[in-house]
Image (cartoon, rainbow, N blue to C red):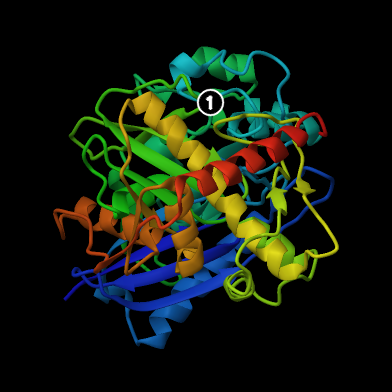
Amino acid sequence: MPLIAAIDQGTTTTRFILTTLEGKVVAHAQYEHKQIMPRQGWVEHDPVEIWRNTRRAAGEAMASHDITDEDIAALGVTNQRETAVIWEKSTGKPIYNAIVWQDTRTNHDGDPARYQDRTGLLHNSYPAAPKWAWILDNVPGARDRAERGELLAGTIDTWLIWNLTGGARGDEGHEAVHVTDVTNASRTLLMDLHTLDWDDDLCRELGVPRAVLPEIRPSVGEFGVVRRRGPLSGVPITGVLGDQQAALFGQGCLDAGDAKMTYGTGLFMLLNTGTTPQFSEHGMLTTVAYHVEGEEPVYALEGSVAVGGSLIQWLRDQLGILRSAAESEKLAAEVVDSAGVVIVPAFSGLFAPRWRPDARGVVSGLTRFADRRHIARAALEATCFQTCEVVRAMEQDAKTRIAELRVDGGMTDNKLLMQMQADLLDACVARPDNIETTVMGAASAAGIGAKLIDAPLTLGETTTWHSTMAGPDRDRLIERWETAVERSYGLG
């Protein structure tokens, strides 16, 4: 029976899986990459390290179960979205590190909604286009080289596909493929949501020559064939989705009104709005959810929170309060509440629905009574509060109550967090057995694109949590959170 492969290139790790057509994962491997922070507010990755880890993960997973290239019928790719790379066409060498979606160096002082009706995005530090422009303006000679056609730009999916299909050397006489899909293109501030093509006026205004940009293709369809040298030789690439859209697809949210929340490095909620883009009045973004070749594109509203699981990483790596991420659940469960401690993790400002780039992280309510258990619980509460804000804003835009929130991502292994989320949201929280919906979404897209399957792969049974909190207790906690958030303003 053929297998489907998928690459999940995330903010902190690169994962590779092999799954059957029934959704059973038979092999996987994963590698972390370095988080490079040269200045306050700057976050970078080494694209070469990411490419190296992709090959290592694929080779290790295949070798661990003696799987050959011939066993694999299709490959899907999903990726951290707005992270921007520019490299030399002739050598494949990046001219600068990848600038990560969390990076704030390209904050914009003008009207953030100027391009929202065309792109669905706000003009701030989040999209890829200002990052590409920054690289072109700050690497000596880069802009001239771009105009001469010597450079290529892309988000991480484009970088990986270009290398997978041959890179600078090409593959048996064929040039590497320089492409992206509509979901990733919709995160750049350069694609018109209605035409699904690059907008020449936006390219000029934002300072990104169209010549460096990849071809935009549907998410589910043909992207190229993996080069003959190395693992995955000859495997067709038939599905590409940005990570949050992949999670939506993997959760089977294919009908208008379906929604999911992913708890990863950040927190990301998407609501399927059907085949017509819907624009938000409450701080949400509009994006392409997915596009199957030959069909109409499907759109979504999105609420993006910059800091989710990375708050737990901060407690572990920078402060040393936790020995492991999993310890956050154990410590938080040892106390009945946070003893008044509130953490607002505005490390790079606040994203949806507030969009306050001037906000910075705040810890309030500290007393001598508070210890690391209360801080761990406050960190989990911060995740829940931020989720609640996005859900409430999404409900206002959609004019409907979201009674069940489908969740996924690494943090959802934390059962205490899931119960706290149900309590503070006052709604059912539903989690599939397989919480790696991002990589499964990429595999599903690839399987459908290769005509191996006709629906997303199964994620197993679902576990649910329901609210056990009294209304006044919930209101008191939310009021305390909102007060702390206001104290974070104006510090950046």
- Residue 88 location in percent, x, y? 64, 44
Q: Dot 1: what SS?
A: loop
Identify the image quadrant of the C terminus.
top right
In which quarter of the view is residue 311 placed? bottom right
Quick check: can you spot residue 123? yes
Q: Is 191 drawn above or below residue 388 in the view shown?
A: above
Q: Is 484 drawn above or below residue 122 in the view shown?
A: below
The tally of labels here is: 1
Q: Which residue is mark 1?
A: 189
- Residue 28 location in percent, x, y? 42, 76
- Residue 148 location in percent, x, y? 63, 28
In which quarter of the view is residue 361 placed? top right
**Residue at left 64%, top 27%?**
124
| Label 1 environment density (alpha carbons within 10 Å; few <14, some 14–19, many ≥20) | many
Callout 1 amino acid? Leu
- Relative to residue 324, is residue 352 drawn left or right? left
Between 385 and 270, the one lying in front of the other is 385
**Residue at left 44%, top 34%?**
392
- Relative to residue 260, is residue 184 drawn left or right? right
- Relative to residue 417, is residue 463 drawn left or right? left
Identify the image quadrant of the N terminus.
bottom left
Quick check: can you spot residue 199? no
- Residue 223 location in percent, x, y? 34, 47
